[in-house]
Image: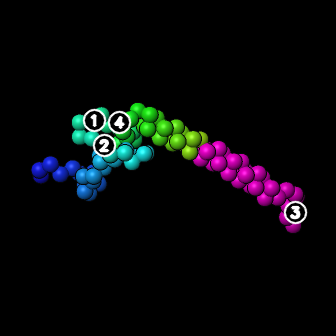
Amino acid sequence: MGSRMLSYAEGDDSHFLEACSLCSKSLGHNSDIFMYRGNNPFCSQECRQEQIEIDDASDKKLRVSLKKSRETNKKSAKSNVQTGTLLVA
């Protein structure tokens, strides 16, 4: 097998530790690499923290959007309910 690195999907992912996922700064062979969410490398704690904050903001926006969508769907479902009396002869 040699020194070839494999990703989770068994594909060639041998270049994923060459650059920071946020700022694209080259990652040195003898420098610290800060990982986040599996295989996302960062050159510093600051870059990793910035990505965490970006992801948190995106997640929050998505949750708010989904909540609004659910509320709209509930209102729509309520307005489609028909009331009245059914007479059967």
Numbered range of the magenta stretch: 61-89
- Sequence order check: which comes first, mark 1 or mark 3? 1
Dot 2 surroundings within 10 Å: few (below 14), some, or many (20 or more)? some
Numbered badge on residue 87: 3
Which secondary structure, mark 2? loop
Which secondary structure, mark 1? loop
| Residue 86 drawn above or below residue 69 | below
Image x and y of residue 69, in percent: 68, 51
Residue type pointed to by label 2: Leu
**How far apart, in angstroms, are the residues tagged by discs 3 and 2?**
77 Å
Instruction: Tell us which disc is closer to us: 4 or 3.
Output: 4
Q: Are marks 2 and 1 in contact (CB under 8 Å)?
A: yes
Q: Is residue 9 magenta?
A: no
Residue type pointed to by label 4: Phe
Residue under label 4, please give it: 34
Residue under label 2, please give it: 27
Q: Are marks 1 and 4 in contact (CB under 8 Å)?
A: no
Image x and y of residue 36, in percent: 39, 39
